[in-house]
Image (cartoon, grey):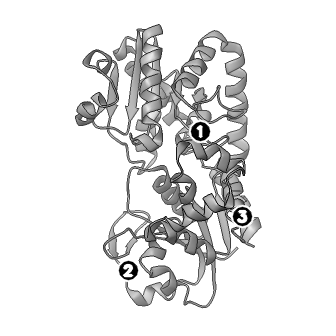
Amino acid sequence: MEKNHYILGFSRRRSGAFEHSWSLAKNLNKRGYETRFYSSWWDGIPLSVDILTEQTRPLEENELQNLNGILHLQTHTWEYRGFLDKILAGKKQTLIYGLHAIIPYFYLKEKDKIPFLEGKLESSQLNSLITNLSEREKAQLSAMEKSDYLFTISKNHKRVLELLNIKKTIHVFENVSDFYDLPREMIEKAEEDAIKLRESFRKEKVILYCGRIYPKKGANCLFESFKKIRKNYPPSQLILLGTKEKMKEEMMQYGLNENILDSVTFVPWIEKLDENSAKSMLKYFLASDVLIQPMITPELYSKSVIDAMTVGIPTISCKSPYTIGSSENAEAVFNSFIKIQENPEKVQEVVKRARQKVALENTWDSYISRLEKIVS
C-alpha cells in the first residue's frame, strides 16, 4: 500500500464521524504510514492539523495540488467547496470515500426508510428525492462519482448505494472500537471509577445514551421509552453522555417533567484526545447496565454501540445477532429492556458473541489489514 495517506476530514466536533476520521489518521501514523490530517467545513479555509499536537495552520492551494498517495475523503464539504477538484489535479492518487451516512436515505420520511432499504420504493420516488436535495447534499453524490472506492459502515448502506445505481467498488467497513486497545491497567482504573459513579446514583438500573440529542437521532424514541422503563423500574437512572445540563429546558419539549429529570445525568462530550480521555468516557459505559442507541436500520452499528460491545454492555439498538431486540419505536425499546431483565443468561450469550465479533472485525488492526489488501 502507498506510504502517503491524507485524511480529508473536518474540524473537531461531537460526532462519531469525526472520532473515526481522527482515529484513522492516528492509527495509520502509528503503523508507520506517512499520514496527514486536513480539515474543511462549510465555511472558512481548509486547515492542516498536526496529529500529535492538534495545532492548525492554513492549507495553501499549492499543497492541495500535491497530495499524491491515498486520499481518505471523510466529508463531502471538500467537494461542495470545490477543493476536491484541486486535489485531484495531482498525478498519483487513490481516492477512498468513507461514507458515514447516505444522505438521500437520511432525508427520507420515516415511513419510507424501511421500504427503501428493502428496495420497494418506485424509481420515480427515488428520482424525486435526489432532485429535491440541496446543493450541499448533492455534493455527496458527485463526490462518489470521483472516488475509486466507497467504504460504507453497513451492508444496508451498501444496498442503498446499489439501489441508487452508484457504479463504484463498494466495501463495508464498520465502525471501530476506541476501547479495544486500551492498556489493562487503564481499564482497571476506569472500572474503579465506574463503581464509585454507580454508587453515587443509588439506583438499581443505569441506562446510557451516547451522542447528540435531536429527533433524527431517535431522541423521541429514547425519552418515551425511558418514561415507560422508569414507570416499571422507578430506581432507574439515564446518563446522557454528550449533553450539557443547560439542555434541561429543551428536555421538557420531549415530555420529561422535573420529576423524571431528577433521574437524568447530563455529561458534556468527552473529547478522546488520548488514552486518559478515552478512560474518562469508558467509566460511563462500565457504570451502565445497558446502552440504548435508537436505530431503525438493521445491522448498522454506531461507534457507541461498538464501544459498548467491546466492554460487554448489552445494547438496544439496530436489529442484529449482537444486540437485544430492536429500537424501531419506544415500545420496542421498552420490550427489549424487559427482555434483558427477564433473560440474563441469553443476554450474556449475546454479549459474549458481540465481544467476539468486535475482536475479529471492529479493531484498527483488522480495519487497516483489510485496507492494505484492498488498496495494494
Q: Does the CB distance between marks 1 and 2 fall below 8 Å?
A: no
**Does 269 appear above or below 143?**
above
Q: Residue at x 28, y 15 (%)?
A: 259
Q: Position of residue 130 (x, y in %)?
A: 56, 65
User: Are the two marked residues, 3 and 2, in contact with CB atoms closer than 8 angstroms?
Assistant: no
Image mark for residue 170:
3
Q: Residues within 10 Å of mark 1 (few under 14, many from 20)?
A: some
> Which of the 4 image quadrants contains residue 340?
top right
Kindly tell me whether residue 283 is visible in this rendering.
Answer: no
Residue name at image x 72 percent, y 47 percent: 118
Amino acid type at circle 3 is Ile
Residue that label 2 marks: 59
- Above-or-below relation of 234 to 113: above
Residue 197: percent from the left, percent from the top?
38, 21
Residue lying at 26% horizontally and 30% vertically, measured from the top left = 248
Q: Residue placed at 62% from the left, 36% from the top?
A: 318
Please tell me the numbered disc located at residue 296.
Answer: 1
